[in-house]
Image: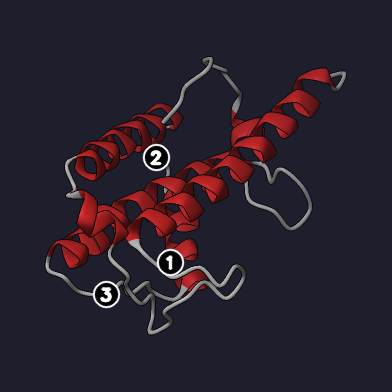
Amino acid sequence: MEVNAVVIVDDTVWTNPIADGKWSISEIVSHIQKWDRYLLAETLPAIRRGEDIEFPDFDTYNQIASDYAKSGILHSELIEETILTREQLVLELSEMPVDALHRHVTVNGVSNCPHTGTPYSLAYIIKEFIEHDSLHKQQIVEFLGESTSTPK
């Protein structure tokens, strides 16, 4: 995970939604970490066994991440867990054989991305996760910019 700078935020900024109907920073960080853990625990082993990819119900799994963020875990612990998990994911992906990364797979029974028509592979799924995480990073950066510029 790319860490550009350390930004210390108070509990209110960490736990309040970044916008109406949106998650807090802590929930977003937990969301990213939980999906990285899923990739490590379920997706990569399935690919190594030559199997297809199965993801759980997104809303249910995302709720688990939200609940974890609200469980009382310290900010520093959640951030540390997230960094360590991402580092492990990067390591395991770097050790994955190239043919396994690009092997055509189905994802929950679907062979091509419904948005682009691109055949699914682990490499394609990882690209989608990177794009997804980048959107969340941008949300956090924008929120922090607004939070720090707002008069107290």
Q: Quadrant of the C terminus?
A: top right
**Which of pointers 3 and 2 lies earlier in the amino acid sequence?**
3
Residue 52, labelled with which disc? Answer: 3
Is 123 situated above or below 117? above
The residue at which mark 2 appears reads as 73
The circle drawn on residue 61 is 1
> Disc 2 marks which amino acid?
Ile
- Where residue 122 appears, as percent x and y from the top left, is 33, 59
Give me the residue at 35% from left, 49% from top.
36
**Percent x, y of residue 27:** 53, 47
In this view, the residue in front, 140 or 120, is 120
Asked if residue 81 lies left or right of residue 45, the reply is right
As rendered, which of 32 and 77 lies closer to the eye?
A: 32
Quarter where residue 149 is shown: top right
User: Which is more foreground, mark 3 or mark 1?
Assistant: 3
Q: Is residue 35 above or below residue 86?
A: below
Q: CA distance from mark 3 to mark 1?
A: 19 Å
Mark 2 vs mark 1, foreground winner is 1
The type of residue carrying mark 1 is: Tyr
Element at label 2: loop
